[in-house]
Image: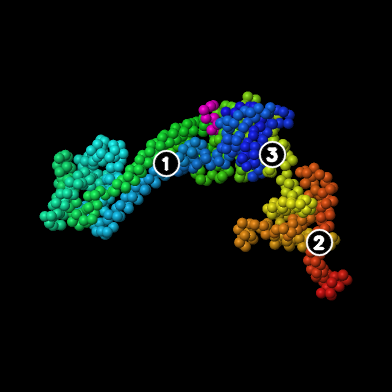
Amino acid sequence: MVDATKVSKMKIDTGYAGVKEYPIFTRPDGKAAQCAIILGKNGSGKSTLARALGIDVEGTEFFDKSGNSLGDDCSNVHIFNEYYVAKNFRTYEASSIAPVLLLGEAAEISDEINKLKDNISSNKKYIESLKAKRLSGMLDAFSPDVDIPFVGFTLKEYVNALIDNEIILQDDLLFCGDELDDLPAGNLYERTFAAMLVGTFFSKEEYVRCIAQGVQRKGSEICEDVISSAKSGCSLSVIKDEMRKALESLRGNWTSSAYKEIEHSWHNLSFWIMFFIYREFGAVFYEIDAGVLSKKDRDLIRGCKEEIYRLERQLRVWEDKLEEIRKEESSKPVIAYINELLHVVFGEDCMNLESSVNGGYCIKSNDQIISPYRLSVGEQNILSICYFFTSLAYGKKIEHSMTCNQIIVLDDPVSSFDDGNKYGVTSLLGYLCQTILGKSSKTKLIIMTHDPSFALNMSKMVKAIDGAKLSCWVLKNDSSDSLVKSNFGDIDRYADVLRGMYDFALQEEESLVAPTPNDVRRIWEAFLSFELGETSIANMESLKKLSGYFSKHQKIERFMRVFIPQLFINNDSHAKSQVMNGNLYLTPTLEGKPYEDFVKNIVCFMHIVSPRHIAWRMKKSSGENVQDFVVKLDNLVREVLDDSKIVAATSPWQGNQGLRRARHRGGRASLGIRRQAAKR
């Protein structure tokens, strides 16, 4: 166990990129932080860091602020992430009424139990397949006669009973070797004879198995007698009559419970049944005489039986353990603490857990039991994180579970949450941090997220508790995987993408990475919403408004007339159009120079409409001079407005439109427009 109070940084052997150092709890003032918040985009290495603390721990080592090693024991590091949710959250189909919820170790054990049950079922199905194959091999040649009753049951039912008895016999042989004379008390023969004495059977199958056991008890003797007696040429009618008499005698002896008489009539009935089979189904008779199951089949069945018994022993152990955990987890203090945390997120009337009579938990909302299947992914994650913090109390008092010597890691605790659930979890973590960061606490907390607003809100809450215990970082997605100090207030995703578009449009550096079409679309829509109050500029009504606004600036108006129609044909912002055309992977429809021109035109449009927007937003992320940005953007706009492609694309059309407008107003077009029209 590592001494969490002394941990300042850690080193992780990533294998593919060497050893990385993460000064997570190091502060600029030399003090050791108690809470570290790490912001990183998806793919920046957050999950790698979490795995190094909880799963792939072999290359992980802790250090204090002086650089002294604290060892590599991660046993007191507790991690909440997507793997934890998948591992600890299950909906369990209860045996009655509604399903219940299993959390934590109970969910893992339930999985093990289900695996054992599946394996037991697979072995039983394999035995049934061997049985069906043997039954088919013996009787298919005589179909459909095998389904005609001859003494209250059919040949198929009788042979099936013989095979069942052989299979059941393997259970007894497992405990005493292969010696039939040494079968343990309560073996198949004794159970069968006991049923004969009572004369009551649970089913027809049991009744036929009891009759068939008479042949298997003295099989070789009976078959020899049948073959010897067959030489006398006994008729079929006599055989059937003798079968009926033997069966009536056996039934009569059941009521008297006479041991010797039952044994005699049982043996006699078995003789006449085999005589009938010898006479009508000779090949079946000899297969029964040789043994209905081959040695190979008996060995296979015995192996399956041994495996079933082994699995059933394991199953009983796991079921007993699950019952103990259910009782422990469903105790009043655990339920009360989970609900206390749920109330912080949802309020007292929205969601509660109650102990279920079937084990696990029932979920109640507004005094109504709801199915776990109705929970959203966000609600499942919230339940899991409440259980996670409750599970830290196992073996200790709940009030001490947040303050002992440990490191708690939360990897993207608000992943995939809507705003309401995100707010609830943020409130919950703020509530818990008051205990975790208390004066007597030895617990350290790491929160990793891709959400800038969540990182900022959490940092504000921790600062309100004790700012001296906080360190904030940004995990850079580059070759260094380095942590960079941050206060999260300067993070501006919009400005970052905008800077990428600006650099790509100006092409001042070689090998610039093109901004993704999706990022361009998001910037475009945000700009339209903030600056123009529009969600889409790709419509004729907006075209008229903008054209009219810039009517005194011929070059800009001309640019607008070329640029705005591009938005109709650029499918990168319209996934529906791509799918309709078979582009199921949504690959970019513009590449190379056309895409560069498209981004350049968007940047110019934004600068024309709001001349200081780009410059001021990028200033926050770069620290460069605003005027320098403005000058470069002005030059870019002039270059684009004078582009020969735009001039060529608009000049004839502009002349026609000017002529039409003049005629529509009842006036006379200008001399320049009339001359252009005359030339055409």
What's the residue type where badge 3 is placed? Ser
* Location of residue 669 in the rendering, given as x and y in whole percent from the top left corner: 85, 70
User: Which quarter of the rendering shows the N terminus?
Assistant: top right
Q: Magenta span covers which residues?
A: 390-397
Q: How far apart are marks 3 and 2 (CA)?
A: 43 Å
Circle 3 residue? 482
* Location of residue 364 in the rendering, given as x and y in whole percent from the top left corner: 51, 40
Any mark on residue 643, and which?
Answer: 2
Q: Which class describes the residues within 10 Å of circle 3: few (<14), some (14-19), or many (20+)? A: some
Q: Which class describes the residues within 10 Å of circle 2: few (<14), some (14-19), or many (20+)? A: few
What's the residue type where badge 1 is placed? Leu
Q: Distance between the residues labelled 1 and 2?
A: 73 Å
Say if the magenta span includes residue 532: no
Circle 1 residue? 116
Which quadrant holds residue 667?
Answer: bottom right
Q: Please, which residue is most extreme toward the left here?
A: 232
* Element carrying mark 3: loop
What's the residue type where badge 2 is placed? Asp
* Element carrying mark 1: helix
